[in-house]
Image (spheres, rainbow, N blue to C red):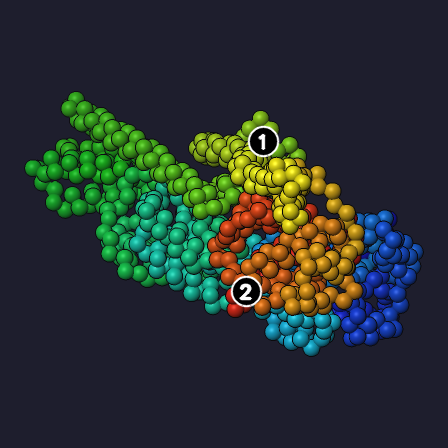
């Protein structure tokens, strides 16, 4: 089996940035180095500089594919495979092949070349990446039907951006280096607007940066590299829920802004021990501030706050950590140790740590925390207090020993036992009780320096020592359990609050739950499965043979990749699972409602239709009936002029009725999806001229500027003519006397636009969408006025031809209706 070829993609923000030129330039360089390079296919678009670059490069013959009487040229895939060069140059990776070709898409042809061991250099515009399709449509307003799957593109060996500043690209366009002269004005005023190009350029650079970031993460994972690589500044701000959070966030945002592409991440560690849980209201304010600063908010539950914080920072490949100086004063710090900041600094490794001063630093006096989970560290500390405090207390008491000090001695040792119990629990307390009892007997009770219990009350005293130590330790241990449970509940509540906040802010509920599950339990990967379908995933890919599965619904499971969860975490996971169940049910209900909506819309249309019919059909029927009745009643005595007037009235009314019935039938067919479209190559001029003749418009009524050359569109000529008649009639009705209607055509990329411009009163921006609703009419009606279906039908007809009908404000006043249709070649490729 041959070694798989390598794919190199030249990515551009828009047509004309120089992708094809760069590809040919690279091909010439490789050919000069002795490589076997051939042109698979290159689309020169008639650009002289591009044509010149193809000279001297060998090319394989193209394949001719006939479709509906038109011969189309496609890449000769079989010829390239037979020729089997080292490197093939294949332009326009997203291109759709003509029907009858071996593969539907050109990227599938490239896949065959790669499988055969042939290296491929190809070109692609950012708008053709599948995952960015909707984003590009929002930016440009132009939907892209030719796309390349992200999975295929991410398998490329190299992806390079061919960059050109937006204004430089517009200058190239104006100079005629991209499109012919007749297409320049339309292109500059539509797709190639400066704002569009800037947004597309940013999108291309961001997409490539994210792709590089994913590749970097994969490389570090494959090579077991845990050390942070500072490829991009990622600043993690640790929030405690205290008043210093706003200061830390703003400082972190400034640090992130110092480098291009810097990211701000805020994290709150909720734990059952360590720092107390923050104020929920304050954390909500901090979360809102993070979003204003273009950062992201994260919630993590961790047993140990410093460790959890450092692990989170490493998981996101953070380069900097921002912490607040401790709010404890010096006295509290002396009892409780160096604090979280010092531990984070020690464990952070190559992550820079910023200790930020703030107004609340060192001003809060609190007693050392004496409650909490009795960890191993606490028990060891209890023994240390007993071993150090016992001798120290004994030395102090021997300095002031007297016959009357026995009561003071007993109470002092009793206090030591209570302190040890509070710090370390029952076992250190029992140890301290026995040690203090022996010390009292040996050093302070006659006879001295011997351990001898000659009276039963001394034995009772020792037993009381032990009992008191046990009781105090029991109280401390129970308080610790209650505190642990309370803090755990608070942490769980904060996690659920964070999830709910993500959903309320518009995040995808299911994805938000999956993301927060991974972050909360600090596991590498989580995914939600429905059978073999992945509904949502977060983090690393979950291996099929090594994960924990939790059933969410009958056909949905949550899969966790990582260490087994503790029993306490299993309860929280059940809460998350319940939330997922509710989110899935809500999504199911939403989908059901979405399916019902067209039925409801049809019912509304039927109601409006019946309402309109009761009024609009009455007029022509009444007029026709009155005219026929007048003819019948007058008989042969009726003069010729009156007879002609009555016949004209009847004819006009019956024509109006025929038009109404035709429109109603068309509406029914559109809504039922059974409208038949004759999808054939059409010259727009051949439909514009008959439409003008039908309306009896002369040279003074219309100004034509048809600049589409010989470009055809794939459309139904009859339906397109009906659309034009309706739009032209509307424009004429509202245009002031003596102001001609302007009709122009232009091509842009793979679209052709027909613009109908009037100088009438126009329509308020908030009403533009309403004009396409059925039964909407402006102004008074007469006997020839329809049901208000004209624009609704026009948009339906255009959309059925895979086009768009868009209203725009005419500069200086008026309305411009823009019909955008795919060119004939694009339509053939897509059929």
The image shows residue 291 at horizontal and vertical percentages of 43, 54
* Residue at image point 76% right, 59% down: 686
- In the rendered view, tell whether residue 495 sits above or below residue 122: above
Callout 2: 10 Å neighbours few (<14), some, many (20+)? some
**Left or right: 195 in relation to 281:** right
Q: Nearer the viewer, residue 670 or 314?
A: 670
The image shows residue 217 at horizontal and vertical percentages of 60, 54
User: CA gap, disc 2 to disc 1?
Assistant: 64 Å
Q: Secondary structure at mark 1?
A: strand
Q: Residue furthest top?
A: 456
Q: Nearer the viewer, residue 754 or 157?
A: 754
Q: Which of marks 1 and 2 precedes in the sequence?
A: 1
Of marks 2 and 1, the one in the foreground: 2
**Is any part of residue 430 visible from this angle?**
no
Q: Nearer the viewer, residue 377 or 513?
A: 513
Q: Residue furthest bottom?
A: 175
* Residue at image point 39% right, 55% down: 289
**Is any part of residue 365 visible from this angle?**
yes
The image shows residue 276 at horizontal and vertical percentages of 32, 44
- The residue that mark 2 highlights is 736
**Left or right: 67 in relation to 163:** right
Marking on residue 556: 1
Marking on residue 565: none
Q: Secondary structure at mark 2?
A: loop
- In the rendered view, tell whether residue 92 sits above or below residue 183: above
């Amino acid at each position: 089996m041959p070694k798989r070829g390598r794919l190199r993609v030249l990515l551009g923000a828009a047509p004309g940035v120089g992708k094809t030129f760069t590809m040919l330039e690279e091909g010439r360089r490789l050919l000069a180095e002795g490589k076997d390079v051939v042109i698979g296919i290159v689309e020169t678009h008639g650009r002289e500089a591009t044509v010149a670059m193809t000279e001297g490069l060998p090319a394989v013959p193209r394949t001719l594919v006939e479709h509906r009487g038109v011969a189309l040229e496609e890449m000769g895939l079989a010829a390239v495979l037979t020729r089997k060069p080292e490197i093939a140059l294949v332009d326009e990776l997203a291109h759709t092949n003509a029907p009858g070709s071996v593969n539907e898409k050109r990227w599938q042809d490239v896949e065959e070349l790669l499988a055969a061991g042939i290296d491929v250099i190809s070109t692609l515009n950012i708008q053709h990446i599948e995952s960015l399709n909707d984003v590009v449509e929002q930016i440009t307003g132009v939907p892209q039907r030719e796309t390349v799957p992200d999975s295929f593109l991410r398998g490329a060996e190299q992806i390079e951006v061919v960059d050109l500043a937006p204004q430089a690209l517009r200058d190239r366009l104006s100079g005629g280096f991209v499109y012919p002269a007749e297409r320049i004005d339309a292109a500059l005023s539509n797709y190639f607007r400066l704002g569009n190009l800037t947004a597309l350029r940013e999108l291309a650079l961001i997409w490539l940066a994210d792709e590089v970031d994913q590749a970097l993460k994969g490389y570090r994972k494959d090579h077991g590299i845990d050390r942070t690589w500072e490829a991009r500044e990622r600043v993690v701000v640790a929030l405690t829920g205290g008043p210093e959070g706003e200061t830390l966030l703003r400082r972190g945002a400034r640090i992130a802004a110092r480098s291009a592409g810097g990211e701000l991440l805020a994290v709150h560690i909720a734990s059952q021990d360590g720092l107390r849980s923050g104020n929920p209201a304050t954390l909500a304010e901090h979360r809102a501030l993070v979003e204003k600063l273009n950062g992201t908010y994260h919630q993590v539950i961790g047993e140990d706050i410093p460790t959890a914080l450092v692990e989170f920072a490493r998981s996101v490949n953070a380069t900097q950590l921002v912490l607040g100086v401790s709010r404890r004063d010096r006295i509290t710090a002396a009892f409780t140790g160096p604090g979280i900041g010092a531990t984070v600094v020690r464990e952070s490794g190559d992550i820079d740590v910023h200790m930020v001063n703030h107004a609340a630093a060192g001003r809060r006096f609190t007693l050392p925390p004496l409650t909490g989970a009795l960890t191993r560290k606490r028990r060891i500390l209890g023994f240390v207090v007993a071993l150090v405090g016992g001798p120290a207390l004994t030395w102090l008491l021997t300095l002031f020993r007297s016959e009357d000090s026995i009561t003071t001695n007993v109470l002092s040792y009793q206090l030591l036992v209570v302190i040890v119990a509070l710090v370390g629990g029952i076992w250190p307390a029992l140890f301290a009780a026995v040690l203090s009892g022996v010390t009292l007997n040996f050093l302070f009770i006659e006879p001295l320096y011997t351990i001898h219990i000659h009276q039963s009350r001394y034995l009772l005293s020792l037993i009381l020592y032990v009992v008191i130590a046990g009781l105090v330790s029991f109280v401390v241990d129970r308080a610790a359990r209650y505190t642990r449970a309370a803090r755990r509940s608070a942490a769980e509540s904060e996690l659920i609050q964070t999830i709910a906040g993500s959903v309320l802010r518009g995040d995808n509920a299911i994805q938000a739950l999956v993301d927060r599950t991974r972050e909360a339990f600090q596991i590498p990967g989580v995914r939600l499965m429905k059978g073999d379908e992945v509904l949502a995933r977060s983090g690393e890919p979950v291996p099929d043979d090594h994960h924990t599965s939790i059933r969410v619904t009958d056909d949905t499971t949550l899969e966790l990749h990582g260490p087994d969860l503790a029993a306490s975490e299993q309860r929280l996971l059940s809460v998350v699972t319940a939330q997922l169940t509710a989110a899935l049910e809500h999504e199911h209900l939403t989908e059901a409602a979405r399916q019902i909506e067209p039925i409801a819309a049809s019912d509304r249309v039927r109601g409006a239709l019946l309402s309109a019919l009761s009024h609009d059909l009455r007029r022509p029927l009444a007029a026709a009936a009155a005219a026929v009745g007048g003819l019948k009643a007058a008989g042969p005595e009726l003069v010729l002029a009156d007879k002609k007037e009555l016949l004209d009235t009847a004819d006009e009314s019956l024509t109006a009725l025929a038009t109404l019935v035709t429109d109603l039938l068309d509406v029914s067919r559109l809504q039922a999806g059974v409208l038949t479209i004759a999808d054939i190559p059409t010259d727009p001029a051949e439909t514009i001229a008959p439409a003008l003749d039908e309306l009896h418009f002369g040279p003074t009524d219309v100004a034509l500027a048809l600049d589409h050359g010989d470009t055809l569109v794939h459309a139904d000529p009859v339906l397109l003519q009906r659309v034009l008649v309706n739009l032209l009639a509307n424009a004429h009705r509202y245009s002031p006397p003596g102001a001609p209607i302007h009709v122009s055509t232009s091509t842009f990329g793979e679209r052709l636009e027909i613009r109908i411009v009037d100088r009438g009163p126009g329509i308020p921006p908030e009403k533009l969408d309403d004009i396409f609703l059925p039964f909407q009419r402006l102004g008074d009606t007469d006997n020839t006025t329809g049901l208000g279906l004209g624009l609704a039908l026009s948009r339906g007809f255009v959309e059925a031809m895979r086009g768009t009908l868009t209203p725009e404000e005419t500069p200086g006043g008026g309305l411009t209706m823009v019909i955008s249709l795919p060119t004939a070649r694009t339509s053939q490729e897509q059929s």
